[in-house]
Image (cartoon, rainbow, N blue to C red):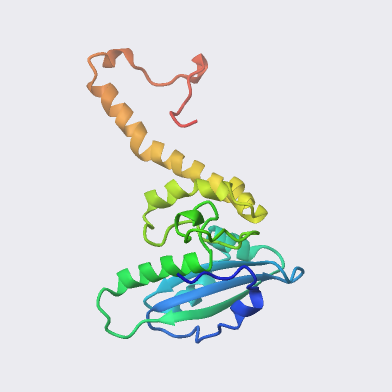
Amino acid sequence: MYTMPASADCRSLLAIGGDIHFNGAGWYLHIITDETDPTWYALYVGQSEMVGKRIRYHKTHFTIADSLHYFTWRHPGKKSVFVLLGCLPVGLEDEAIILNIGEQLLATVFQALPEVMMPEYLPSGVKVRLPHHGLMVARPMKQGHRDAVNDAWMIYKSSDPLARQFANTVYKASLDEGRRTQVALEQAPQIATKRAKSKKAHLFRDPDEDYGDSPSVMR
């Protein structure tokens, strides 16, 4: 399998070009560069059944949505370029599966996956390029919410300071909010139901803050 050579720099990536307004199915590469450091760049590989529309979505949502990709893009001094990596013929069967497989392959070629994950997919003898340039946090072949959460710990192990900053601020806050929501929507009602049905239900009372009780099961 082809892998991007260690000597490749941002100029060779920008030279890929391609029609980013192409509205058919295919794959794209997002290259983020830094105005003050010509050696710094970060990469995100994506796919869509309508590439042009998906790129336009990125451009209009990166300022309001939270992800490592958008967090890095929003950072002061960063510039953005999209290139088209490839497209699919119209009417191809199993298009969605092919797009996912292609995204996984391209994310490996460009080493856009988390650096801790990369050894799982790189051929024997091919090392992870450092400093790492990847902005992806989930495996393209497994992008369910549970899968993404299971893989998210890898962000904390990144050698990229921006990735660690994202993990310890934005992502941690998102996880904490998710846990509070889960408690409110699932655990608290379950506890209340079990208490109501318990033979010892008469022993339970409403929380009384005068006695030091917490007004909520959420802490």
Residue 197 percent location from the top left of the image: 22, 22
Of 4 and 73, the residue lying toward us: 4
Residue 173 percent location from the top left of the image: 55, 45
Residue 79: image quadrant is bottom right
Q: Is residue 34 above or below residue 130?
A: below
Q: Quadrant of the N terminus?
A: bottom left
Q: Is residue 215 above or below residue 114?
A: above
Residue 213 percent location from the top left of the image: 48, 19
Q: Is residue 147 above or below residue 125?
A: above
Q: How many marks?
A: 0
For the view shown, which residue lies furthest in the front direction? 125
Of 130 and 141, the residue lying toward us: 130
Of 6 and 86, the residue lying toward us: 6
At 38% from the left and 21% from the top, the residue drawn is 206
Q: Is residue 109 left or right of residue 38?
A: left
Residue 65 percent location from the top left of the image: 52, 61
At 27% from the left and 81% from the top, the residue drawn is 92
At 62% from the left and 50% from the top, the residue drawn is 164
